[in-house]
Image (cartoon, rainbow, N blue to C red):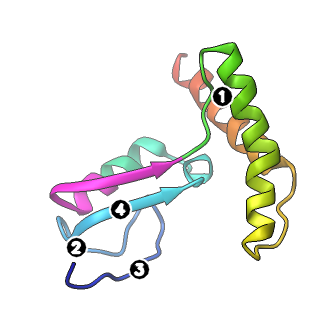
């Protein structure tokens, strides 16, 4: 890797030229995007051919035993890791709000 630069911006209007980025990342942010298709189109516009879009979000699993394990991890392990890493404690609703936002969007997209 020659160099890396951090560019922060509105996901729906990235402050970069067309086909100029090798990688775009978004973590726990799609729930805050007003227009997801627009944000994804903007990422596609900004990525070089062969570029990578890396998205980290919470999700719902379709297998009950795995969902229970995932819930324990999400609500008990992740907050402890955050505190151990020196981060300030997040409200307990951050995982819940992410999941409920994803569920709302999924329901709305079916209409």
Q: Nearer the viewer, residue 75 or 94?
A: 75
Give yes or no for residue 1 being in the magenta stretch.
no
Position above or below: 30 against 11: above
Q: Secondary structure at mark 2?
A: loop
The earlier-in-sequence mark between 3 and 2 is 3
Q: Which mark is residue 17?
A: 2
Q: CA distance from mark 1 to mark 2?
A: 33 Å
Q: Quadrant of the N terminus?
A: bottom left
At x 41%, y 78%, the residue is 7
Q: Which residue is mark 3?
A: 6
Residue 63 on image: x %, y %:
62, 14
The earlier-in-sequence mark between 1 and 2 is 2
Q: Which residue is mark 4?
A: 24
Mark 3–mark 2 CB contact (< 8 Å): no
Question: Which mark is nearer the camera, 2 or 4?
Answer: 4
Give yes or no for residue 44 being in the magenta stretch.
yes
The earlier-in-sequence mark between 2 and 4 is 2
Mark 1–mark 4 CB contact (< 8 Å): no
Decide if residue 109 is on the left or right side of residue 64.
left
Q: Secondary structure at mark 1?
A: helix
Residue 97 on image: x %, y %:
76, 43
The earlier-in-sequence mark between 3 and 1 is 3
Decide if residue 97 is on the left or right side of residue 56.
right
Position above or below: 29 against 2: above
Q: Secondary structure at mark 3?
A: loop
């Amino acid at each position: 890797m020659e160099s890396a630069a951090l560019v922060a911006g509105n996901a729906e209007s990235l402050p970069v030229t067309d086909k100029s980025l090798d990688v775009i990342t978004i973590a726990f942010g799609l729930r805050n995007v007003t227009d997801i298709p627009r944000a994804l189109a903007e990422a596609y516009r900004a990525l070089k051919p062969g570029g990578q879009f890396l998205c980290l979000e919470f999700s719902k699993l379709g297998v009950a035993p795995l969902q229970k394990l995932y819930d324990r991890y999400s609500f008990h392990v992740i907050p402890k890791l955050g505190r151990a890493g020196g981060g300030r404690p997040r409200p307990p609703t951050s995982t819940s709000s992410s999941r409920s936002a994803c569920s709302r969007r999924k329901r709305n997209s079916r209409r």
